[in-house]
Image (cartoon, rainbow, N blue to C red):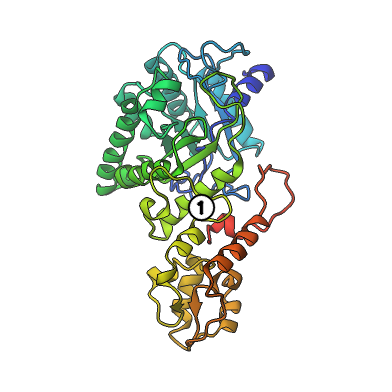
């Protein structure tokens, strides 16, 4: 059985990876089995920023042969080391599940010995959980770069989600800060998984939900390397398009390791927050990375990306709320996806006025500068004045690292991504 000291080391070592959440799986329980990852079966316990908190997040080993400069578990680091066997991890997962501590597993590992050996140990763990312990709960497995692709493909048949962390937006930074990794060692497995998942989804029968039902995710560290937000967003856009990723996670750099090639200060949560907002615009609002930021440009600090785009394109506004197409409504600051479709539905029965928009919970303190209702306009025509007002509203927002025990926040816009 895994002792308390090793458990502490392995869970502490896993806390810097943010690319895990438990949404999207359709794996259901079977007769005689334990756990359920389907929509009704897993406990969706999320923090206000949408991250799932009901997973056991642990490394199989923190003994690493790689020497990534930013990683606290790198080969040269003087830290306590520990590892767990597949059987010990299986017993821990089942024990925690039966005590209602967790509803699923996020399993990663340092490269202990070799990539293939590490991947074999992780594969054995998930197979034992599924076959021996009949565990049907959620499993997210972190792929090991350079491991044999057959090991990767086999693991994908037993888990709900896999992720390979890109880490940095450019190959130059990856080689500089993670010399044992390469662009191909991360992107090739992601491409292979996307191809195999498409093939599995096109088949009929049970295999449809057996191959990565919750898809793939990845993570990028923001601020450890000099790339601008525009370059980060272009890479994210390309991965969404080519690999059908469920999510790209952005992790603001924290100097847990000191090195001459790394910054000495934290990147800050505001930059991470702006990237998530921009990412949401690309996924759900029809924006392209090029529209949001130029390749060598960072996102503005004082405005969210949607407001910044609108101010650059004032010639497109105001739009008439009773006539504008859905594509244009989604680009109005203060109108989110839910609000846009509410407007479409409501205006079939009546001409909407500003009072109606308040009832539909449209954020008029932003939207009024970009819309008319029945030809009436109540915003400011001075773009400088509009920018100052929007910046003041943005400045009043709070950006802090949320914990499981934070006081309840007004999280509607964060959970739903309404901008």
At horizontal 29% and vertical 43% (from top left) the residue drawn is: 242
Work out whether residue 252 can be spotted.
yes
At horizontal 68% and vertical 42% (from top left) the residue drawn is: 403
Where is residue 135? Give x, y as percent: 50, 35
Where is residue 146? Give x, y as percent: 35, 21
In front of the other: 48 or 387 = 387
- Answer with the quarter of the image where residue 320 lies: bottom left
Q: Compared with residue 65, is residue 408 higher up or lower down, i.e. above or below?
A: below
Where is residue 188? Give x, y as percent: 30, 31
Q: Compared with residue 106, is residue 176 higher up or lower down, i.e. above or below?
A: above
Looking at the rendered structure, the secondary structure element under dot 1 is helix
Left or right, 42 with respect to 283, comes to right
Crowdedness near tag 1: few (<14), some (14–19) or many (≥20) residues, C-alpha within 10 Å: some
Residue under circle 1? 277
In front of the other: 26 or 148 = 148
Tally of numbered discs: 1
Left or right, 204 with respect to 227, comes to left
At horizontal 28% and vertical 43% (from top left) the residue drawn is: 200
């Amino acid at each position: 059985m895994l002792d308390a000291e090793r458990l502490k080391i392995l869970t502490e070592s896993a806390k810097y990876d943010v690319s895990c959440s438990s949404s999207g799986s359709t794996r259901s329980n079977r007769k005689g089995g334990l756990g359920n990852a389907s929509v009704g079966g897993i406990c969706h316990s999320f923090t206000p920023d949408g991250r799932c908190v009901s997973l056991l997040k642990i490394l199989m080993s923190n003994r690493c042969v790689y020497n990534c400069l930013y990683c606290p578990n790198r080969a040269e680091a003087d830290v306590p080391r520990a590892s767990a066997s597949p059987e010990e991890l299986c017993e821990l997962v089942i024990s925690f599940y039966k005590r209602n501590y967790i509803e699923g597993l996020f399993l990663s590992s340092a490269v202990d010995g070799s990539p293939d050996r590490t991947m074999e140990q992780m594969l054995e763990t998930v197979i034992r959980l599924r076959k021996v312990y009949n565990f049907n709960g959620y499993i997210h497995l972190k792929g090991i770069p350079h491991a044999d692709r057959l090991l990767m493909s086999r693991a994908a048949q037993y888990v709900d989600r896999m992720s390979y962390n890109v880490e940095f937006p450019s190959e130059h930074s990856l080689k500089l800060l993670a010399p044992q990794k390469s662009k191909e060692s991360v992107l090739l497995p992601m491409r292979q998984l996307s191809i195999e998942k498409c093939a599995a989804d096109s088949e009929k029968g049970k295999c449809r939900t057996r191959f990565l039902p919750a898809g793939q995710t990845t993570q990028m560290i923001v601020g450890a390397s000099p790339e601008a937000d525009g370059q980060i967003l272009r890479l994210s856009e390309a991965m969404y398009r080519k690999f059908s990723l469920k999510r790209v996670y952005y992790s603001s750099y924290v100097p847990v390791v000191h090195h001459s090639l790394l910054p000495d200060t934290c990147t800050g949560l505001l930059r991470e927050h702006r990237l998530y907002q921009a990412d949401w615009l690309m996924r759900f609002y029809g924006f392209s990375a090029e529209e949001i930021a130029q390749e060598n440009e960072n996102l503005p600090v004082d405005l969210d990306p949607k407001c910044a785009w609108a101010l650059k394109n004032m010639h497109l506004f105001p739009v008439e709320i009773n006539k504008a197409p859905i594509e244009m409504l989604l680009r109005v600051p203060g109108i989110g996806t839910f609000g846009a479709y509410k407007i479409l539905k409501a205006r079939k029965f009546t001409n909407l006025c500003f009072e109606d928009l308040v009832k539909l919970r449209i954020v008029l303190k932003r939207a009024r500068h970009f819309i008319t209702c029945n030809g009436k306009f109540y915003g400011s025509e001075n773009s400088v004045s509009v920018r100052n007002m929007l910046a003041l509203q943005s400045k009043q927002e709070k950006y802090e690292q949320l914990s499981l025990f934070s006081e309840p926040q007004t999280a509607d816009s964060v959970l739903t991504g309404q901008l």
